[in-house]
């Protein structure tokens, strides 16, 4: 019987990818994806544990779902609730205890087993079926082909987990050890995505540029080589990758930006902080000058390279002077966009145990100052494109009537009249106006 599956996704792009893959895994059981939670037969919340509020949101979402499940039961409908992702991994038992109406808890490396887990649900039990193993088998070997096309711009996870252990971060605990998918498996999936209509691929990994994997001939490839091979796929017009760690930004990879035409001139390269003292305390394995050197090299080979980053303010022990170094780094680099966060102490991480935590008020003030600077840079970057003609990949109808939305090579959202081209086309548009988070454009 046809059943409806609603997945709500929090967190990073890897979770977006995983949500689509969970839908693929459940399709053979008769589940089809639905945007509507109310009439669903099963709701999965795919969670993120990176900052405090993320986990809180999960528990309030679960509170709402409890009411929904009870309401459905009164109407004679037996609906299921599953929690996936990084909160599931970190707090599986806690979820089962605090929210006994949850049926399944599954971690990011075990969701290929969802069909068995669902079969194991015992309606009489107050405990969820929990699978938060880091299985020895590679989940990618067990995932079925995509059930539905992914659209013009698709995500493709190539690397999972992290061994870097930045002192603030939960990812090494929630996603497990660093693992690179073999190239053959990546190339097969990439070709399939392109055959099904995707023209842009974004390769994903917590440290995507640390990818080092087995080549189809059994030898070893590095990430730059993987990009070169992917670029050979007929019909693949754009390639991106995220998130990169500065330490793994090799010269070969930097040069790939000059040599691979499909590689877009945009790089998300988080630095987190601009002071060497804080970078060291964060265990980032590079200095401020190392970061500048990489940016210079990138701009040498690719002068129009747009940069994006992540910043944390108020890391334990961060002084006004350290923070000034961060602002100064931002000034020197010039970002096209960036994400910034107040430091959030995460259970089990070394930085959370330090006794020199920064006052919340100070964190808020620093965040506001940093965001003001980034916003000004972003607006200036966008404004500089007005009058230019550029290639835009048409991705979807826009929220506004009679508009379509797409992406510039530099990751900017672009809005233009709906009469322009078809979804999946790359069209040449003239930029007519620039805003904080988007561009307006018209046909040339
Ligand atoms: N692997 C990526 C980042 C993954 S997490 C990298 O190394 O760059 C995404 C972002 O969340 C991080 O870059 C960081 O800026 C932020 N983040 C991670 N842990 C955090 C914490 N405890 N408090 C605040 N922000 C955090
Ligand atoms: Fe977290 Fe650091 Fe690993 Fe990024 S590199 S996922 S910030 S531990
Ligand atoms: Fe969040 Fe897990 Fe991604 S903690 S950022 S969903 S890897």
Image (cartoon, helix red, strand yellow):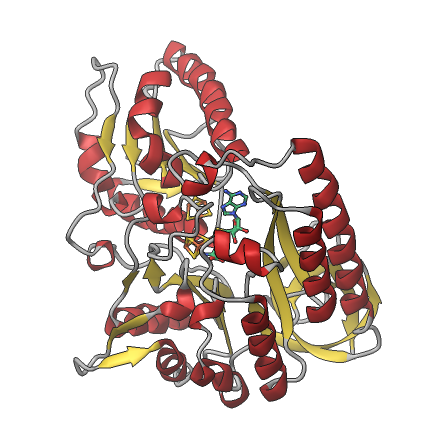
Left or right: residue 269 versus residue 410 is left
Residue 442 drawn at (x, y percent)? 79, 71
Question: Is 16 above or below relative to 117?
Answer: below
Q: Residue at x 55, y 36 (%)?
A: 356
| Quadrant holding the N terminus | top left
Quadrant where ligand 2 appears: bottom left
Q: In this view, does 225 lie to the left or right of 219?
A: right
Query: Which residue is nearer to you in this view: 321 or 142?
Result: 321
Please indicate whether residue 311 sits to the left or right of residue 63 in the image: right
Position of 124 relative to 7 (above/below): above
Residue 45 lies, with reference to residue 400, above or below; the image says above
Q: Is residue 232 visible?
A: yes
What percent of the width, then of the height, locates residue 201? 46, 69
Determine the image quadrant of residue 164: bottom left
- Residue located at (48% from left, 37% from top): 354
For image coordinates 82% across by 68% down, the residue present is 383
Q: Is residue 225 left or right of residue 325?
A: left
- The answer to which quarter of the image holds residue 436 is bottom right
């Amino acid at each position: 019987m046809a059943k409806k599956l609603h997945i709500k996704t929090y967190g990073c792009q890897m979770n977006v990818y995983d949500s689509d893959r969970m839908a693929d895994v459940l399709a053979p059981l008769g589940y089809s994806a639905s945007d509507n939670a109310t009439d669903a037969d099963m709701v999965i919340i795919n969670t993120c544990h990176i900052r405090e509020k993320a986990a809180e949101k999960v528990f309030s979402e679960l509170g709402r779902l409890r009411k929904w499940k009870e309401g459905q039961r009164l109407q004679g409908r037996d609906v299921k609730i599953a929690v996936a992702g990084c909160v599931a991994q970190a707090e599986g038992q806690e979820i089962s205890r605090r929210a006994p109406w949850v049926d399944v808890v599954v971690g990011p490396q075990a969701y290929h087993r969802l069909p068995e887990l669902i079969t194991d649900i015992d309606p009489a039990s107050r405990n969820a079926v929990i699978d938060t193993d880091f299985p020895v088998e590679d989940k990618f070997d067990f995932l079925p082909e995509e059930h539905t096309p992914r659209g013009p711009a698709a995500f493709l996870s190539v690397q999972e987990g992290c061994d870097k252990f930045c002192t603030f971060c939960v990812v090494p605990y929630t996603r497990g050890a660093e693992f690179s998918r073999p190239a053959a498996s990546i190339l097969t999936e990439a070709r399939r995505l392109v055959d099904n209509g995707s023209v842009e691929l974004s390769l994903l990994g917590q440290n995507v540029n640390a990818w080092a994997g087995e080549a189809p001939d059994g030898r070893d490839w590095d990430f730059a080589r993987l990009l070169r091979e992917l670029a050979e796929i007929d019909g693949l017009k754009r390639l991106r990758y995220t998130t990169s760690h500065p330490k793994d930004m090799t010269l070969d990879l930097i040069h790939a930006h000059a040599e691979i035409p499909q590689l877009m001139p945009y790089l998300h390269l988080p630095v987190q902080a601009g002071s060497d003292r804080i970078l060291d305390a964060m265990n980032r394995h590079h200095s401020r000058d190392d970061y500048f050197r990489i940016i210079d090299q990138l701009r040498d080979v690719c002068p129009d390279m747009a940069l994006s980053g992540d910043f944390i303010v108020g890391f334990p022990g961060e002084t006004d002077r350290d923070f000034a170094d961060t602002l100064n780094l931002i000034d020197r680099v010039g970002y096209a966009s960036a994400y910034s966060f107040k430091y959030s102490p995460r259970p089990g991480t070394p930085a959370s145990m330090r006794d020199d935590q920064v006052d919340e008020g100070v964190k808020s003030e620093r965040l506001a100052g940093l965001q003001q600077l980034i916003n000004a840079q972003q607006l200036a970057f966008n404004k500089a494109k007005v009058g230019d003609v550029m290639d835009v990949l048409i991705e979807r109808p826009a929220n506004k009537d009679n508009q379509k939305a797409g992406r510039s090579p530099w990751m900017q959202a672009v809005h233009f009249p709906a009469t322009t081209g078809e979804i999946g086309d790359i069209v040449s548009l003239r930029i007519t106006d620039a805003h904080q988070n988007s561009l307006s454009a018209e046909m040339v």
